Image (cartoon, rainbow, N blue to C red):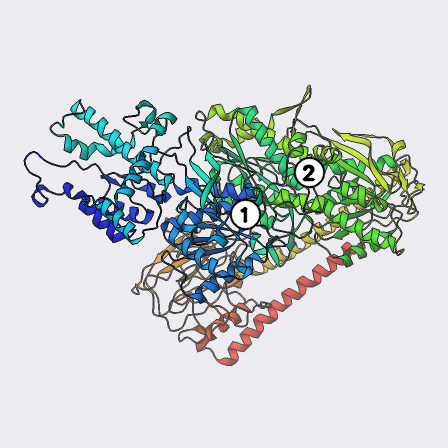
Amino acid sequence: MYDDCGIERYSAFGALDAVSTKFPKDIRECYGDGAYELFLGVLGTSRSQTTSNVLNMLGSNIPVISPFATLPELANFPNFLRTTPADNDQVQVVIQLLKDLNWTYIAALYTNDNYGSSGMEKILQLARENGICVDVVQAINSTENFANIATLENFLNILIHQKKQTKNKTLGIVYFGQKNVIERLLIRLNQLLTIEYRGFHWIMSDFVGTSVEVFNDADDVSDGTITVSTSSVMIQEAQQFFEDKWNAALTTTNLSSPLDKLIAEYRTENPTAGIDWRNDFIMPIVDAVYVIATALKQALFKKCRNYTIICDGFEDYLDNEFLNIMKNTTVDYGLLNYTAGPKELVDLGRQVRFDPHGNILPDRSSPLYDINMYNVTRKSFVKVGTYKNTTLSLNSSLLASHQQLSSCASNCSNCTVLPPIPYKYVDGDVLLMGMFSIHDPKDEEHAFACGKFRNYTLDVIGQESFFHAIYRLRNLTKIQFGGISFDDCYSSTVGSLTVTQFLSGTTKLPFGSTGQTIDPTKVLGVIGPYPSGVTVPLTLLFSRLKLPSVSYASSSPDLDDVINYPYFLRTVPSDVTQVEAMVKIIEHMGWKRVGMLYVNNNYGSKGKALFMDKAASSGICVTTPIEMSETGNQNELYQISLDIKSKGEEVIVYFGTEARIVDLLTEMKRRVEQNSFRYDFVFLASEDWGDSNNIGSKLGSVAKGAITFKFEIKSADVGFEDYLRNRKPVLEPTNRWYREYWREYFNCDPEGDFDKRIGKTCSKDLQFSQQDLSNFVDDQRVIHTMNAVYALGLGLNEVKDLCPPDNLHGCQYLKEQPEDVVKHILNIELQSGSESFPIFDEKGNGNLGFTILNLQVAGQDTYDYLEVGTYKAGRLDLSKNLLKFYNHNGSGREITAPCGSSCECFVTTTFTTTEATTQGPTVTSTAEYQTSTIVIIAVVSSSCLLLLLLLLIVVVCFCKLRREYDGPNASKPLKRYYNTPSEPSGGGISQVSKPPSDIQFINPQGMSSDIKYMGPVSTYDGEQKGGIANGPKGQVNRAFSDPYLHPAIGSNSSEQMYRQQTPMSEGYDQGRNDYRRNESPVRCRNREPVTNSSPMSESNTSNYRPDLPPREEGIPNLKQYQLPNGYPRMGTSHVINGSPPVGNSPTDSDHALLNLLAGNNNVTPTDDSPVFSMSDQGSPFGEMHERDRKAQFASLKKKQKRLYNQTAMEATQSVEKISRV
């Protein structure tokens, strides 16, 4: 036995000395004839830090079993065992204790050693997950004695400041650390007599445990302190043994044992000291000794077959096998008699076993921890609870004074911390991912942020139905489904960012108390999203990942595209169906003229477009639509209300979200109450308005008479009402949304919440009324959410047999055959009572129709939705006699919505109709509509004829020009150009000019090509924007047809030369005009000749070159000489000395090239070099007299001008003839 004094170097010395028998025999002490030691291992040490040091030094084969070391990370050592629980278990006890005492706002202190740091880290993690705010976290040096008064005051002032924010001016503090530090702190606190240093209440870890001496000198600040200690049993025999030692220390003179001498020395220095009995340390030590003894017994039996003889080879056997034997040892005290084991443990039948990591397993016969409370009067601890089988049991009567001692008094902002991505999670073998719009988007400047809580919708209730359906799926399929839900904040940017971060693994989302993270590969399908504007981009992402998705609300016609969204389904009909229903209602009512209001998002804009088209084809006049932004201000809403009023329509078709119509109706109601607004119209509104209670109960006075749509609902669910009835706003690790909804719905702060914005705490007995529950359960969004979950889950259940047994996660079939998976989901039928019904039609849309509602006055300031019809499978059933419409004063009225004598419409021609009746469209209006159609067809036909004649005239003119130029060239010999390298004919870079149509090109393989022009030699590397190539060096832009790269071989090896083929464009005029357009006789300056870079020509008449006039037209607004990505501009691209193509600042030579492209120079190519300059020696123009050159140029210009004028005159005369016709 060694005393390491809690110091690492002493523990190292003791361990090395103890294992000296493991050293080679020639360097270890000899014990005499036949005497030797068997080294069985290390029992200790007393601290986690020193135990870790010993383990690192001894290696991995020598057993180390500790009754005290609780650091969880020690389990990573393969040779470590412990007979005391790890701190993970103790932390769970502390958190559960805080929850039971309802301490929600605390401080935390810990010593900065392994024991304190590790324990506090886990406490903070679990506290966050359980809604406990740890506002102050303070580390203390493990040798701190608080002798410095300034240090002490600074430390205490932090705690005092936090205490002032508590409700009762009392602060709970959790201490996790060494007992000597807290002992000194309590003594110093006890010496400070000021009242502000009182009011601290403590929970301390097992290192303090039942150590009474910690509190002996701190009576004024220690009463009621709660400690956690390892569960103990009073072993009388062990206590008697120690008392005998204690008493003999002063009476016995010849003390041979070092322990006896130590006790005697202590008693001599402290004659009045009483015996300090740490009963909670005794049982772990006894357990450790019995584990070693039992393991030795088993080893002797296995190797030597008896317990009395140490056989040959036993020492080597211990070296190799004893550690494994210890790990698998079970000490069963119940099998021992009183002679062989402690009576108390034998009577309990206690068992000691280890898990694979060497941690002691809980014994179901005895508690794992005891909860103690210090009584300052008795100077002792009273047991007030136990922790057994993961359950904390407390004596509530003894702890009554400790209830709610530490909670936040007001809005504690430091405690409101949300995860980087808000989510709710239920663990499972496979996951369904839900998307819900719980918050509004913020604003355009904060595209990735969320705005205010959507308290006017039932999105949170929809999310609850999502998880309820997942729990029920487990029973229906026997698959352990789990779920994760996100808030997309009604924003495609937020939704896309959230989903991408999670599914890509970029953001790790934790769950549970063990620090695990959610595995995104477990997600097998998606439920949602709600708004179409979010669903469209996200579904494209899900499709690429081959994830089936089922939306419970998105109705945009964009999602009918099965090519881009092959794995998308929805439980609701497409807006195409809804628009058909709207138009049929208008026709059935005999209305001729309506207004249009829509929200500028995907849902509203696409719905508006569909309605306008359908109305036009049905002879319904729609005035100019009014657009409403997704997040407009009050001024915009007021202006919209004025626009509606000024148009005077009796019926306004609304296609948009509930949120925006609520905003508009709220503004209208405000104006009505100020007597500044009157209205005499009714809304025909899309399903997002539906049977909204926010409108019916609060805004009915300005919305009465509205006709609204609601998705037909068939519920396959059982039990959701009971689920909601029992659902309380409890604190959850990741989900704050239900508590937020509770706060908004009941206008109070949920109990234990740090956000005290309302200022009134919710009653514990608060719950939803029966009417509330009925509204929730019958809500169309809630029912469709659960139907979507059931369809997806049951569809996956049908394909599980095609996957490995009990392993949907990672099943290759789901990724390799997603179309088949979707087919199984598509064919699912649900049961509603005794009736089964398919969820989807053959297109993957909801196999349901619409219920038509009318918002009517039900009493004084009360309004209710009455069902007045249905629309399904193209059939409208509408009870007109049930419909009620109202004037602004609330009296009944009829809606006729006629067009009048002159009906100006946005999408149709002017209507001239007879007075409309309520019996539907008349024959007269239909006939007039047919007449207008005939007129339109006639106008379009005439226009087409004019265009055809004009095109014919243009073709004739160009043919005439062609004949004009073809005459001199008809007898010229055929000239061939080969795009194979040859010797250069002169200095500079060579380039092939585009010939006329009688020049044939031959490619390197000798085959005829359609290519009319070989581009310049270039070292362009494809990296500059606007160039020909877009890829890596040498890669050709795919905008060019049949491109290839032909490297030029030259003496300059530092330059990589390429020839670029240029395609023939559509409408190519046999090379004639493009020849003039691209003829650019410019030689690059200061350029070394490139070997084999000029084209080889073959001709019967080598000196002949065709004589064509220069192009005279300029290039308008050409500000930079640079090729775009795609087909090149007129002219050629070239480089100088390996530099990239010219950009925004052309050189002098580049300006010359531009002038040539604009047709400002008269040039003729020569045989020697297809690329040359007018100033070059040897050029034909260089040898001509200046006057002759100008005369020739002027003659050519006159000839060309005459031809152009003649063509223009003929075209003008033709157009005039057509106009007369």
**Pointer 2 local density, CA inside 10 Å: few below 14, some 14–19, many at least 20:** few
Q: CA distance from mark 2 to mark 1?
A: 22 Å
Picture quarter containing residue 838? top right
What amino acid does circle 1 point to?
A: Ile
Looking at the rendered structure, the secondary structure element under dot 1 is: loop
Where the N terminus falls, by quadrant? top left
Compared to residue 1049, the image places residue 385 above or below, namely: above
Which residue shows up at 34% across the image and 28% down it?
A: 343
Residue 192 in the image, given as x and y percentages of width and height: 49, 61
Quick check: 620 left or right of 756? right
| Circles 2, 1 touching at the beta carbon (< 8 Å) | no
Q: Nearer the viewer, residue 607 or 1030?
A: 607
Residue placed most toward the observer, 501 or 947: 501
Mark 2 — residue?
Answer: 765
Residue 654 seen from this side = yes
Q: Position of residue 1019 (x, y in %)?
A: 39, 62
Name the spot of residue 50 as percent of width and height, x first.
29, 49
Residue for badge 1: 132
Mark 1 crowd level (few <14, some 14–19, many ≥20, 10 Å Cα): many
In the image, residue 615 sits, relative to residue 1030, either above or below, namely: above
The disc at residue 653 is: none
Q: Is residue 714 left or right of residue 306?
A: right
Q: Residue at x 49, y 25 (%)?
A: 800
Closer to the camera in the image, 119 or 774: 119
| Horizontal and vertical percent position of residue 155 | 47, 61
